[in-house]
Amino acid sequence: MSVENNRNVGQQDYYMVDIEDYPESNWDQFKQVVKRTFSTELFVGLWVVLREMLKFNIHTVKYPEEKLPLGPRYRAIHEMLRLMESGTERCIGCGLCEKICISDCIRMETKIDENSRKEVSEYSINFGRCIFCGYCAEVCPELAIVHGGRYENVSEQRAHYSMFDDLLTPMDTFKAGQQKEFPGFGAIIPGSDESVKKTPLAY
Amino acid sequence: MSEITITIDNQEIKTKEGEYILNAARANGIFIPAICYLTRCSPTLACRLCLVEADGKQVYACNAKSKEGMQVTTSTQNIESEKRSIMEVYNVNHPLQCGVCDQSGECELQNYTLEVEVDSQNYAVPDVERKVLDWGHIHYDPALCIVCERCSTVCKDMIGDNSLKTVPRGSEGFNTDYKESMPKDAYAMWNKLNKSIIGLTSGEQMLDCTACGECSAVCPVGALTSTDFMYKTNAWEQKQIPATCSHCSAGCQIQYDVKHTDIENSDDKIYGVKNEWNYVSLCGAGRYGYDFENAGVSKDESAFNSAIEAFKKADTIKFNSIITNEEALILQRLKKKFGYKLINEEARSYGNFLNEYKKISGTSLYSGDLNTIRDSNFVVSVGTIIKSDNPNARFAFNNSMTMNKGAGLYFHPVADPVVSAMSKNMKAITHAPLQEEVVLYLILDLFANKEELPKEIVDYLATFHSTKTITVSETIKEQVIEMVVDAESGEEKEVKKMVPKKVSKEVEVDDNRLVEILKIDAFDEFMEKQLKKKDTFSLIVGEDFYTHPNSRNLARLVALIEKYSDFSVTIIPPRSNSLGVSLICDLDSEAGAYAVGYNEVADFTLCALGEGDLDMPAFNQQEGTLTSINKRVNPTNAALSYGGYTLNDLASALGVESDLTIDYTSQLPTAGGFKSTAFDDLSDHFTNAGEEVRGYALNVKKNKTSNESVEPFNEDEALAGELIYYANPVKNFSKFSQKAHQLNAKGGVFVSVARLESLGLKEGDRVTVETSTSKLTTSLYVDNQIDGDIAYLPNFDTKLNSEVLFNGYRFNNALIAKVI
Ligand code: SF4
Ligand code: SF4
Ligand code: SF4
Ligand code: SF4
Ligand code: SF4
Ligand code: FES
């Protein structure tokens, strides 16, 4: 199953955990305390630890050498994508991300370019304020601004900015076919095509 | 018009007989979708969205008139299906570019598409190529145009330039496929939409008009936009700051659109100006002249201290009328406390004119305003180059002719092709300068009630009349007898027939020498035709009168017209707040030895242009009130921040203390008609019924009248020869409008194309202009919006000191010669 169609990350072998009924009366509660105090449940836990230690079966992720894979809907530092066909930037400068941003950390300037098209002349995100809510990626009509996977964004100052070119897929990465279509938050909902009513064309 | 009751959707409302249903509904808060209708302009029936059912008949709410007891339903099954199809049709081939469109967020196509809930499309037609056109200050993207004709309608009915019209689109692909399936009105709209597009009335490349930008303001979609604004920012990002335009005395309500400057600078910047175009129409100065702020000013203490020193030393304060009422009051208080002489010539001469006027009229202010002009059906304008002195007076003049089947007379020495073209029912008369009194006598002669008019004046007027015999040719019907052969019987028959015949005869007519002196041809014919069915009259008089050598006499004649005829009179204040200043300040005629200037060059200059000794805030950085031509006190707000000192700071340091400048709003002199309302209690809006709830109207006071004597005119005074005039081109009013980046222009001598040719010079040539008072060297420019031989010199350019060439009066004899 492709990721586009299956948003559930990880293995799908769920099972129900067997949980005892909660004690209802004071007497039941008392019985539970007595039982837990004098049974050997404590040693069960200690045994599990000891057994796994002897088997050398350790699950700790050794960050930073080792990193967990991220789900496609994870929302880390933004990226600006290019059009798959032409490589020009997807952003049309509509300003919706700037408007919707809940922490008011996107700012942009636009102007008319020499081909009479709208051009983004300046774009910045203040990551010191961003709460990674994903609204910008969701509202973007062009799937231009998306969330990437880089979550290490420590900085010396509270305010730190990324500009348009920092976010934009570098041209060599793009040429190398490394820009992936974004499947995560804000991407097209699977099956959208079927729900769109076609507009008749007279050609 | 009498008040009547109609019922819209079971709601009983009161309205006036004959009011359009749409306006009646709007005034009562009932929503009827409508795109193409503009209040104050004629209905064009382009959109057909305003369908309603009135007394069982489907009509268009924007052009169906209310009748007593009318039953109106805004929604029927058929109307809903029409609306749905109309909105679908508007979306056929409409580019999906809301993402970048400048109109997005305030687009009526977006709004109504959602309102009507269009979620699918049933129609299609092959598109034709529609090229984006750059018309100078306006940018036209025909692909976005929905041919609602609002642009061409406002340009014709309100502005009077008539520069836009619908032209054929050239759509071969259009066929009648949907004639049967589409609802009737939607089809009619679709048919017209696909066959037309907007084009220029004259020329192809450039929009050659007075550049008011009103067309782009009324455009419901992103088809017409300001070229300068293109793609700079979005509607939803800007905050609107309500203000009053400070460039001229019309005092239009505007909203400054502000947003942070750029990604680094959070200080507000003005990106444009909006207006409530249903009720206010702006000229180009108001729309494009917004960025004249005094930027980057901080408190310069040493300059402030020198200013205080200068005030201590000074005996005179020079200022102009681009000032708020509150600051004018501060100056008046300073005068009271320290005895300064207050010098403001434009306001003083205007105030003197009003004072003389009221001696005869018996009222402190003139009776008319822009609204009474708009409601008239016969308007006369004298003594003002109306399109540049007060653009809104011209809009009102034009509107009276287009909407009320009106007519008018425009008297001015400078021929104006734009004004002349406003209507066929208007006569533009170019008379010699210093003949303004003759014009007023002519109006008295034609319109005053001779029974009441003082006898000396009646007798004086009679001296200009004589009878003369002229030969007129007229067409009469004459009976002739013809012999015709009957086709059937072959018999010859006598037939009587009436044929028209021209005869000439001699008649005795009245000869009016006043008409002759003004050299008006075909005047009697014009008046006879145009005065039919006219019942509301307006007279507009302007700045030429206030500095006229016989200004006093002119004021008295104007008052006589007001008193003894049906005319209501509007006396245009020469600059933004000349009326307010003249009511608040006691102005002096002679300056003293040492002067502090406020926005005027003096020994110590306080200046909002950033060119003086101490900075002051510009108008878009100030709050306060302005008194307009409509005799209203209008509030304005600060759109931009200002870090420096204000006049109030100076006055407070000098002992005329107040926390804020606007604390003076409630202290404006009630003797001048002001009310003691606090600034924060002033409203600033129009109701849905179009009522202006803006500031307040001045109280007009009654006063005792004195004798009504007037002087006869002296025909020989007329100026002849080479003449210059003191005026600004359209859109530029002052150093402030000039500072705005879109209006920035160079001052010089402006001449018509014809004069340029007769001078044998080229545009841009250096010339000297010499008058009896002085001589200047400057450049020659062409203004194709004037005709005739009179050149004009503006005062908007601080580098050009045109006033030295004049001797008070706006006209002067001058020699223009090329610098060799
Ligand atoms: S993720 Fe949320 S907070 Fe961050 S830039 Fe986007 S909209 Fe703003
Ligand atoms: S929402 Fe997308 S297209 Fe619009 S400005 Fe932001 S990044 Fe660009
Ligand atoms: S005119 Fe309106 S509907 Fe058309 S692209 Fe612009 S915003 Fe969108
Ligand atoms: S340009 Fe705008 S106002 Fe003019 S017809 Fe087209 S849509 Fe209407
Ligand atoms: S300059 Fe005068 S007419 Fe033009 S917008 Fe301003 S107040 Fe109105
Ligand atoms: S508003 Fe009535 S037809 Fe357009």
Image (cartoon, coloured by chain):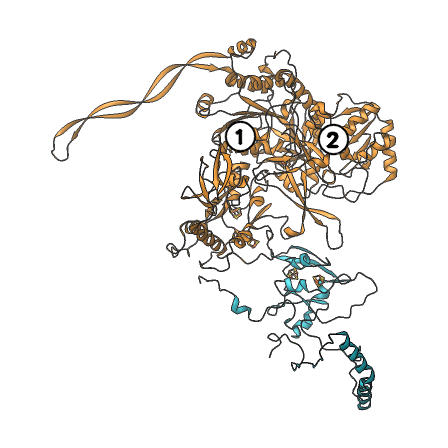
What residue is pinned by disc 1?
A: B375
From this viewpoint, is residue B138 visible? yes
Ligand 5 within 8 Å of the CB at mark 1: no
What residue is pinned by disc 2?
A: B666
Marks 1/2 in contact by CB < 8 Å: the verdict is no
Q: Judge whether A52 appears above or below B725 on screen.
A: below
**B58 with respect to B216 (left or right):** left
Within the displayed image, which quadrant is ligand 2 positioned in? bottom right
Q: Amino acid at mark 1?
A: Asp
- Residue B518 placement (x, y as % from top left): 53, 20
Front position in the image: B9 or B404: B9
- Residue B139 placement (x, y as % from top left): 58, 48
- Residue B742 placement (x, y as % from top left): 66, 43
Chain B shade:
orange
Residue A20 numbered tag = none
The subunit letter for the residue under badge 1 reads B
Q: Which chain is assigned cyan?
A: A
**CA neighbours of label 1 inside 10 A, class few (<14), some (14 to 19), many (20+):** many
